[in-house]
Structure formats: structure tokens, C-alpha cells
Image: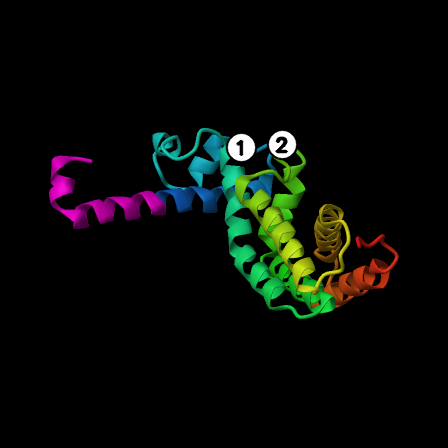
Amino acid sequence: MTQLEAQDPARLGKREKTKAANQQAILDAARKVFAELGYGATTVRDIIRGTGLASGTFYNYFKSKEEVFQALMDESALRVRPALIQERLKATTFEEFLRGMFLVFFSYVVDDNRAYTMMRANSGQIRVRMDTPEVIAGFDELRVDIDDGIERGVVPNVDPEYLTAALIGIAFEMADRMVQRDDPDPIAAADFATALVVGGIDLVPHKK
């Protein structure tokens, strides 16, 4: 921080806004380029070309295209996580717990179809498939909410680690298929996923 900025908070605020705008411009350009070219074919130069910023500006925010991709995944996770938590915490039955969660996620996927499809199509090409901090935090939140649901008697007392993994797997695999349909229906997908889990939960060993 310069002495002038320390004396003038408004000047510092403008600088922070510029930094935020530059970073968002990079993310927006990267999202578009990854969707058009795929992760493997995209270069940092392609991303910079879509921002209108000087090439050196990119490296003030990101070290590589991999970091940009991770940031996009985190940005996506941050948009949907609060709604998922809210639906799970307000549930009074296991069916409500599942349906609310699945419907929020599938609706998000349909509403942000292009971004989601780009993420999933390209994530397998790099080392960070689903292990960015915000994505992992979302998975951890599901596990916490399952533990809480078991305590409240909302979620059956089954292995919480396996249940967490199963719900994540169902959500992402069904979402991948749903967005490939001509008329993706998040309600129908949520109903199917909910019925599938509710119908099979009694066959799973319960803890005493």
C-alpha cells in the first residue's frame, strides 16, 4: 500500500474494485474459451486474448490455466452450496432431505448448463478432477448434514461415509445424463433420485 492510499481509503477501494474486475474478466474469458476449445487445447494466451487485459496482468492473479480452471470450479461450488445446506437443514424427513438437495443441484445444473457441462467435460483432462477447496468443502458439508440428520432422526442411521459418497455419485452421474437430453427436467431427475435412494435405504445395514 502506498502512503497516498493509506491517507485516502477511497483510492484503496477503487484499486480493490479494479483487481476484482480484472480477476472476474479472466474467469469469464476462461469459461468461454474452455467451453469452445476444451481444456487441453486452451492456452493462457487464448484466455488473455478474451479479456482485453495486458498479458502480464494475468499472472498477477493466476499462475497457470490449471489455477483458472480450479477457480472456476470453486466459483461454481460457492454459488450452489448455501442453497443445498438450507434444504438439508430444514428437512423433517429423509425424503425431504434428499429431494430438496437433489432438486437444488439439478436445477442449478440446468440453469447454468453451459458452465456445468464445460467443467465436467474438461475436469477429467487434469489432475484436479473434483478436489478443489470449495468443492471438497461442499462434500464435507454434506457429510456434516448427514451426521446432523442422523442425530435428529431425519436420516436413517446408516454408514454416513458411504451414504455421502453414494449421494454425490448419484447427483453427478445423473446430472451428466440429464444435460445431454433435449429437454432436461430437474424435477423428474430429483424425483427419480429420491425414489431410488428411499426405496433402497431399508436394504442397507443400519447401525444400532
Residue that badge 2 annotates: 126
Give the camera-side residue of 49 and 101: 101
Residue under the image location 43 percent in, 37 percent down? 49
Answer with left or right where residue 175 lies relative to residue 195. Answer: left
Residue 101, given in percent of the width and then of the height, sits at: 65, 62
Query: Mark 1 Cα within 10 Å, few/some/many (few <14, many 20+)?
Result: some
Residue 202, given in percent of the width and then of the height, sits at: 85, 60
Q: Magenta-highlighted stretch: main secondary structure? A: helix
Residue 118, given in percent of the width and then of the height, sits at: 61, 46
Residue under the image location 18 percent in, 50 percent down? 10
Q: Are the residues at dot 1 and dot 2 in contact (C-beta closer than 8 Å)?
A: yes
Residue that badge 1 annotates: 66
Q: Amino acid at mark 1?
A: Glu
Residue 129, given in percent of the width and then of the height, sits at: 64, 37
Q: Which residues are magenta?
A: 1-21
Farthest residue to the right: give it: 203
